[in-house]
Amino acid sequence: LGARDNPELEQRILRRSLKLSGGATTPKELLELSSSEAEEDEEVRERSFHEQSLPSRDLLSERVHESTRALRASMSGGNLRKNFSYGGGMMRTPSHPEIEPSFEEDELDQKKKPPLTLRPTSLTVQVISMVALTLFVMLLLAAALALGTLAVGPPRQPLGEYQILEAQVGEQFWQYYDFYAGKDSAGSNGYINYVSREAAEREGIVEVITEEVPRESMIEVYGEGDARAREEDWLAEDLAFLDRLKRKKEEEESDDDGGNDEETDNSSNNSTSAEKEKEVTTTKKADRRHLQTMTSDSPPPNYEPFNPDLILEGITPTTNTTTSNPTETFVHISSSPTPLGPRNSIRLEGRRRFNRGLFLIDLRHMPAGCGTWPAIWLSDEANWPVNGEIDIVEGVNYQNTAKTALHTTQQCGMEEVPEGSKTGSWDTAVGIPDGKTGVPDMTFRYAKNCFVYDPHQWINQGCVATDLRTEGRSLGMPLNENGGGVYALEWDPVNSHIRTWVFSPHGRVPRNLRDALRTATEVDVGKRVAPDTNLWGLPYGHFPIGEGTNCPSGHFRNMRLVINLAFCGSVAGNRYFMDCPDKFKKFKTCEEYVASNPEELKEAYWKIRGVYVYERAWERQWSS
């Protein structure tokens, strides 16, 4: 083809190529054969290109023509002769690399190569890449969040000082409650009829009274420095009390083991006898101070009423005088008999709902005696026990030791209470009937499960903390003989605990707590003293709740205060034969005894100086 413009050369090439003509004897036949072979080659090339998904047929044709022109150019002149041999046609001549006989094949191989594509990466590489990308994005988000948090500051949380929310005193006491009228709930089943406020006032079972404070009811007042020293002494007494309990427990465990060496025991007893004698003396002295009540024979260093009305009027209380006693105002709640037997009584239901708070109750007298069942408690009755229940003050018959009980659904236990965080113990659960056989289980257990239907505790027993520090003097008749006391419940889910204290008599109340109660109704906010529970000594009840505990704080929410006075029922009635054996001889049921309107029921009344509710201020703080 490259020799068409040179007839002589063309004739020479044709003659020399007769051997390769495949039967063609004339130039015309040879050209036709070459043309058909060229068309077949072009069809093969097009089919190969299409199979490899090349861009277009026009583009391929253009590339073929370019290759053809390049071939013609390379075959012009003397170069063509160097590539022909008379004996065998086209031969590779390695010594002349400028003309490569197989260049057409190399170019076609390059044409046949598929277009450049990205090979798919392995699954491991893909996973690593995705994880790295995710971590990078999370790191960016965390950095943005940190910068935003630093710019905005810490979150708002109820971690500040306690601020007074409700001071329920005097005639204002009633505005915080609704009177429930009707029968008792099926669960309590008390032998009473709750009446409205109008009916209660008509029968004289609710009233507000003001009384002079007798000298024997006044408390000794100390200066600020002496008060702090006194509180430090009380805290030291609490710690010493815990140490004695621990030592006593170790001795009991040692006695149970038995087989101790007699000489070792004698040596130990001799070495510690002096310490024990000193300890007993110190304990008796502390107990006397703990029970101290002013009398007319007591030396009068400086004493005054615990929480007088005069402070409410902005007048300094009178001190060191016997001629003019200040006054205190009380809310008086009692009951009355009926011809049918069940007594008319009072149930007050708070109007405000709480999810936290500090609740202080200043009592001068509480209902006590056989058949009585008084209580001050927190609950959401419509969603009980889902939203929980906390019993702050609850007495049954002749019980004389303060208790705090929590009632919840499942997954609220008190198995991991920090050691040394409280002075109290736990109620016990022994003799629980087996659910299938009815045989009592005499295994000794502490009531640490707050679930109301725990199979190893009494139904609705809950987890119950009991006071040991003032055992036998902090509830019922002994409390009344001491002139009452102050109960405190701290419900603080942000700080992960519920804690309870009882102080009786009032001379035992810490200075900070007393000042908080005395100034709670001050109009001038700057004169109010914020209660600080860290200054009150150890609580007798400590219940860990919230994150990191065995009792989520969501078990207690949306609760309101309830104050009531019930008789008999599912608790006092069921315990009647055990707690009131003398009465049981004459009256075989609690209901029969209450229906007889005995003289003892005259002691069944509340005398409340005030109920004070505080909540922590919202502040921007980082959680500890």
Image (cartoon, rainbow, N blue to C red):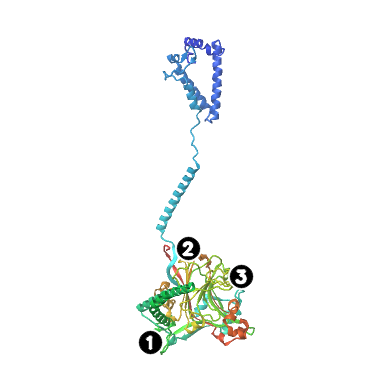
Q: Nearer the viewer, residue 620 or 303?
A: 303
- Please, is residue 447 above or below residue 283 in the view? above
Residue 107, given in percent of the width and then of the height, sits at: 48, 24
Residue that badge 1 annotates: 300
- The picture places residue 131, in percent across and down from the top left corner, at 47, 47
Give the SS element for disc 1.
loop
Dot 3 crowding, Cα within 10 Å, few <14, some 14–19, many 20+? few
Q: Which residue is mark 2?
A: 548
Label 3 vs label 1: CA separation? 60 Å
Three-letter amino acid code at the position of disc 2: Gly
Q: On the image, numbered disc 3 is attached to which residue?
A: 434
- As helix, strand or loop, the secondary structure at mark 3 comes to loop
Q: Nearer the viewer, mark 3 or mark 1?
A: 3
Q: Position of residue 573 (x, y in %)?
A: 60, 79
User: Circles 3 and 1: CB distance less than 8 Å?
Assistant: no
Mark 1 vs mark 2, CA separation in Å: 51 Å
- The quarter of the picture where residue 537 lies is bottom left
Q: Earlier in the sequence, mark 3 or mark 1?
A: 1
Q: Is residue 524 above or below residue 53?
A: below
Residue furthest toward the right?
Answer: 340
Kind of residue sitting beneath label 3: Asp
Visible in this render: residue 512?
no
**In the rendered image, which quarter is residue 386 located in?**
bottom right
Circle 2 SS class: loop
**Residue 193 image point, x, y percent:** 61, 79
Vertical arrangement, residue 69 with respect to residue 187, above or below: above
